[in-house]
Amino acid sequence: KMQLQRGESFASQGKKFIELDKNDPFDSTILIKALDVFTKCNQLIYDVEYLGNEQVLKDKIERRNKFQSLYSEGKSQGKKGFYQQGLSYFLEAEKIFKVARVSKKIKEYENLVQLQTQYENNLIQIKHLAKEGDFINAKNQLDLALTKFSRQDGEELRQKLETVINAKNEYRQGLLAEKIDDLNLAKKQYQLALSHLPSLESAIYRLVLIHIKENNYSSALSYLEKLTDEK
């Protein structure tokens, strides 16, 4: 008899929790509490209605969890600048629950998708310029693109382009120094170029030649080994 009373008490608590739920798909707290007490109830007594309540609560919580997961992933994609991908998550979430907050995000992302598409098209052209060796033009176009749409991959590409441009500038200064026979300055500039871009073979090659001119064969050999390692 005591077990029956405790079971009914849990069931009564569960029903009260269900009444408190505001049907907010973003909040499962009350339903989880209701499920907890109905689970305890069903461990004590057998009642088809209470078993049904437990299953309904499980289903509702599962739906809300899926909705919340889709909504959260949509926002996460947007924060990274992938609005097209984020939009697909919001559209899936809306199939589960149609609420104002999701509808607002869908409209917002639909507008931002256009900017994302333009940015990604620009990025293809910029990467092509960089591949062709036109680093300065590539960086100028990237700077412009990032003022309209900023994303991590663009910022990372800008850093790489800046590194290559700085290395090339130092290398050119080294060539100018060699022309006026200032070999110490030339070495310094080539080493600066390599500090930006260690894989710049042309700078390593020039250092090999300078050290041979200076009869510093051990240093020349050291740089020659680097050149061989790079290849």
Image: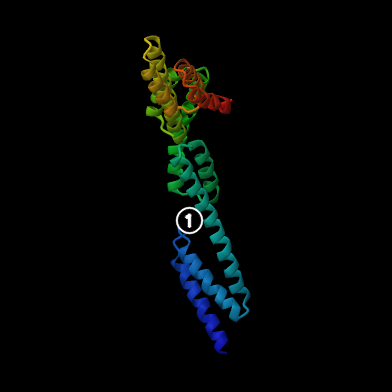
Position above or below: 22 against 81: below
Q: Would you name the residue on which mark 1 appears?
A: 25
* Outermost bottom residue: 1
Residue in view at x 42 percent, y 32 percent: 155
* Outermost top residue: 179
- The answer to whether any part of residue 142 appears in the image is no
The residue nearer to you, when weighing 148 against 39, is 148
Q: Residues within 10 Å of mark 1 (few under 14, many from 20)?
A: some
Q: As shown in the figure, which amino acid type bears the numbered disc 1?
A: Pro
Q: How far across and down, in percent of the image, does residue 64 sit? A: 52, 56
Q: How far across and down, in percent of the image, does residue 181 sit? A: 38, 11
Residue in view at x 55 percent, y 81 percent: 7
Displayed quadrant of residue 175: top left
| Quadrant including the C terminus | top right
The residue nearer to you, when weighing 196 against 112, is 196
Looking at the rendered structure, the secondary structure element under dot 1 is loop
Residue in view at x 57 percent, y 86 percent: 3
Q: How far across and down, in percent of the image, does residue 162 sit? A: 41, 26
| Quadrant including the N terminus | bottom right
